Amino acid sequence: MRVLVVDDERTLVRAIERGLAAEGFAVDVALDGETGLDLATDRDYDAIVLDVMLPRRNGYDVVTALRERGVWTPVLMLSAKDGEHDVADGLDVGADDYLTKPFAFVVLVARLRALVRRPAEPRPAVLAVGDLLLDPAARTVALAGTPVDLTVRELALLEYLMRHAGRVVGKVELRDHVWDGTGEDLNVVEVYVGYLRRKLGRTAVTTVRGAGYRVGG
């Protein structure tokens, strides 16, 4: 398995490189964000270990740029910042895992092995279907560039449909995932689909008679 390590702490990088090599990983190293971005874009890696605070381009910017370029290699972010918002920021921009410094090397290896077991499939931070955009982190929706104000439940329903764009999603599945299956009548799904259509246009959500609803496709 080939791993890219992007960190400007040379002592730490050498230790990670030696340790990963001993575990059977092939390791490439970059000491700044710009070089790391170039390597991650041009070469195929099974995983990327990426520090947050980097010269030339920080880790958040690197992950954002990779995802915008369609590079879905799993990313494990490293940082001395351990605040809840720091972790959330890393995951929201497209990282797959977050490890705070100092860390045990055995944990780093275990996290990497878990990441490489995941398929490198698209996991966009912002969902897009046609001219409809939804940013789950910012909790915003825009239609053809115009912001649309949705309630929390409307947003959750639209997000679930957009994450399964092109697929027909049944009422039971929507109720169980959007309402947690808390005894809500299935009619609540139909009601909220109606709310979405009033705000996004009647064609935003397609009804497939007897099967459910679909966005896109």
Image (tube, helix red, strand yellow):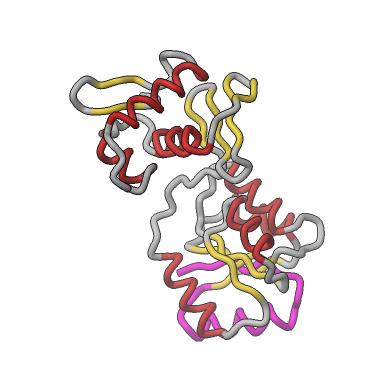
105, above or below 117, in the image: below
Identified at 37% across, 43% down, the residue is: 179
The x and y percentages for residue 148 are 60, 24
Identified at 64% across, 22% down, the residue is: 145
Magenta region, residue range: 1-26
Position of 133 with respect to 46 (left or right) is right
Identified at 49% across, 71% down, the residue is: 112
User: Which residue is nearer to you in this view: 134 or 98?
Assistant: 134
In the picture as drawn, the residue positioned furthest to the right comes out as 56
The quarter holding residue 87 reads bottom right
The x and y percentages for residue 190 are 33, 26
Residue 107 highlighted magenta (yes or no):
no
Identified at 61% across, 82% down, the residue is: 103
For the C terminus, the quadrant is top left
The quarter holding residue 210 reads top left
The x and y percentages for residue 168 are 28, 30
User: Which residue is nearer to you in this view: 152 or 110?
Assistant: 152
163, above or below 196, in the image: below
User: Which residue is nearer to you in this view: 35 or 114?
Assistant: 114
The x and y percentages for residue 215 are 39, 26
